[in-house]
Amino acid sequence: MNFSKIYALGLRHIYLVMNSFPRVLDLIYWPTVQIFLWGFISKFFTLNSAYYNNTVGVILTAAILYDFLFRASISFNMMFLEEIWSRNFTNLFIAPIRIREIIAALTLTAIIRTLIGLVPAVVISIPLFGVSVLKLGIPLIFLLLALYLFGVTLGLLVTSGLLRYGPSFENIAWASLFFLAPLGCIYYPIEILPDFLQIVAKALPLVHIFEEMRNILISSSVDYINIVKSIFISCLYFVMGVIVFYISYFGAKKRGTLINMGE
Amino acid sequence: MFIELKNLTKIYNKYIAVNKINFEIEKNKTIGLLGPNGCGKTTTIGMMLGLVSPSKGEILIENKNLNNFRRDEILKRFNFASPYVELPKKLTVKQNLEIYGRLYGIKDLSIRINEISSDLDIKGFFGRKTGELSSGQKNRVSLAKSLINKPEILLLDEPTASLDPDIGDFIRSYIQNYKSKNKVTVLLASHNMNEVERLCDSIIMMKKGKIIDKGTSKELIKKHGRNNLEETFLKLARSEDEL
């Protein structure tokens, strides 16, 4: 791994954000709106339902964590799409940078875009709704790590699709996370799902992450087995995502799609 | 031989884009790749850049198969410019050159950027976003990017397409001047016959994925009994029997 090349590619995306105030605004706007929306919904449930009593923290924390996953994945996809939209794809793929360095650069830079969007939303939720994700304590770091790895994996799978099918795959980039969200048990416990879907859901790291989040907030205890499980599954998917990306890259070379991507 | 293409073939599904082409390029020579649209020039360049994998045949660089080089090791010896490939539009000219300079691992990058910017007269719009530039300015920036690593092998795909005669001549003069001062092997795909005659040591004519003739411009004009390269090109492009 050549870190100066990884830095160079990351710098390209940092410059892109720095050069455009509307882009920064766009990064901050959606997570903030999301927090406001879920914050008020949770507050309403808390005040008007015995069942939802004391759940404002749980629902809003789930919304913040889900948004972290969403932003991580979208950031990864967006950076790849930027190369297609700007017709810079050929220049990038003929530069002396290895594929693993491109993946590393996108993975590491996606965190910057994600945090630009999420930090203001997290900060706002503290005074406005009295909810702080920091209440999750040290396990929060591990939960975020698992979420980030899974978000990047989804990004890798979508970009693999872009390599395989070209820019027409772009719409899938936006839809990918919504497809998995019902199985992620973000806002409800896994028992809500039908039995056969529970089996599928358990194969995703999301269930373990969000179950553990609820466990920490409601029972104030930490089940590290759940955390280890979520990181392990996320790592497994990440490796799978990298393999799929490589397969798509070699497939694109075979089909010649790298040379006219974005035209 | 510096570069050799042996029986190079590219088949997309059943369509043969490049059909068993063979040619060699000596070190520091400039070869023109001529042919009508869709004759396989861009696919050939794509295979040389590692963007397209050949269906059959091989590309040898100093007798070593291109596939046997490490991607980053071989690509740092290459570079490419084409008006159909752009640099990130939202980044300034300086930012783009800085990023590509870093990707190519250039030492003393600011000195190199300064040098090439002065040569190509692009300093005047260094701080402007690349997407806001005129075609001529974009082409010069693209050329600057393609020379930032002082490539041993430079691939140019229609470098003066859609430029006014003045800027086109500036680019051609610059390439000519650059070649006289630097050791560089150039493969130039173009539809501009004057450009090819002016810059190339020899020419390869392609049609329907095949090489239909090769030689110096004088040899080709004489062989086909025409007055200039344009007439020779038209004769070859329109005749079926050459295949």
Image: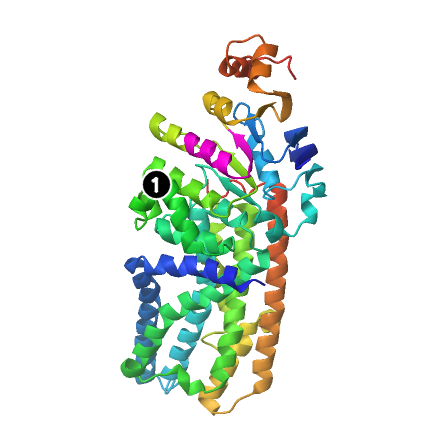
The outermost residue toward the bottom is: A220
Q: Residue at x 47, y 58 (%)?
A: A9
- Give whichever of B94, A246 is nearer the camera: B94
How far across and down, in percent of the image, does residue A259 sit? Answer: 54, 41
Residue type beneath disc 1:
Asp
Q: Give the color scheme: rainbow, by chain, secondary structure or one colour.
A: rainbow
Is residue B173 rendered magenta in the image? yes
Which range is magenta? Answer: B172-189
Residue at the image point whose x is 30% and y is 73% from the top? A36
Q: Residues within 10 Å of mark 1 (few under 14, many from 20)?
A: some
Front-most of B115 and B73? Answer: B115
Q: Position of residue A253 (x, y in %)?
A: 61, 44
Q: Quadrant of the N terminus of chain A?
A: bottom right
Q: Give the quadrant of residue B218.
A: top right
Query: Looking at the image, which residue is at 39% across and 41% down?
Result: B119
In the rendered image, which residue does mark 1 sit on? B121
Q: Residue at x 47, y 82 (%)?
A: A140
Whether residue A247 is visible, yes or no, is yes
Chain under disc 1? B
Q: Is residue A118 magenta?
A: no
Res A192 visible = no
Does residue B231 appear left or right of residue A243 in this picture? left
- The one nearer the camera, A198 or B41, is B41
**Horizontal side, residue B64 vs residue A22: left or right:** right
- In the image, residue A201 lies at what x, y percent? 57, 71
Against B55, is A145 above or below? below
Left or right of A234, for residue A144: left
Q: Position of residue A34 (x, y in %)?
A: 34, 69
Q: Secondary structure at mark 1?
A: loop
